[in-house]
Image: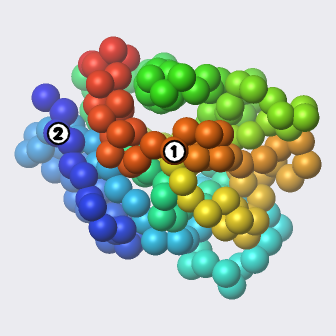
Amino acid sequence: MVEWYHSNQPVAYLEAVQIMEDRVVSMQHGLAGECIWLLEHPALITAGARARPHDLLEPARFPVFETRRGGQFTYHGPGQRIGYVMLDLNQRGRDVRLFVHQLEEWLIRTFAIFNLKVERREGRIGLWVADRHNGREEKISAVGLQIRKWVSFHGFSVNIEPDLKHFQAIVPCGLSTPEYGVTSMLAQGYPISMADFDIALMQTFDEIMK
């Protein structure tokens, strides 16, 4: 059984990382089971393993934290659902590529509950709104995982209703050209609550990740 945890107040980034680290160790020793933690962070920036310094456009605007997850620079903040996914790939086939694909498919089906079509893009991490406005591609969800002894942690972020101007502090995921942008459920015309999205995540999880 996968345990689900919800934090109603923003969680400091380093505190969240320590909780994940502790949980992963417990899972590796058979002392805890799989879990998914849904939360928000205060406004901050994380630098993934492939982050390029010149993509940090406003280094003094928000706290910046280095992380060993995959990916580049990512903004986190209020109005964004963070999903930390601590699952045991020893029980799920030890196939990281398949696991990432399943994680993306889980999110795609969750968005579909609200009649929003999102897609993968070849050669890019995360999920993008299918409709292209004036030829512009807009990203709505980022994915960044770390795997340690076949236990996953970190996970995904989904823009429900964050302040999109905050993304101007970075080049999101290294995509700097004008045809790429960042969007949210609210900006797409879907004014849903965080609780609504959480319910949808829990409904679709077993379809893909069970």
Q: Is residue 155 left or right of residue 7?
A: right
Instruction: Name the one closer to the observer, 131 or 42.
Output: 131
Instruction: Name the one closer to the observer, 131 or 23.
Output: 131
Q: Give how far across and how far down residue 190 sits, in percent.
A: 55, 39
Residue that lies at the very extreme toward the left in this rendered image: 31
Q: Secondary structure at mark 2?
A: strand
Q: Give how far across and how far down residue 113 sits, in percent.
A: 44, 23
Q: Is residue 38 left or right of residue 5?
A: right
Q: Are marks 2 and 1 in contact (CB under 8 Å)?
A: no
Which quadrant of the rendered structure holds the C terminus?
A: top left
Label 2 to label 1, Cα distance in Å? 28 Å
Q: Mark 2 or 1 closer to N-term? A: 2
Q: Which mark is residue 30?
A: none
Residue with the mark numbered 2:
3
Q: Is residue 191 left or right of residue 41?
A: right
Q: Secondary structure at mark 1?
A: loop
Query: Looking at numbered disc 2 in the image, what kind of residue is underneath it?
Result: Glu
Residue with the mark numbered 1:
191
Residue drawn at point x = 48 percent, y = 27 percent:
114
Query: Looking at numbered disc 1 in the image, what kind of residue is underneath it?
Result: Pro
Residue drawn at point x = 75 percent, y = 26 percent:
131
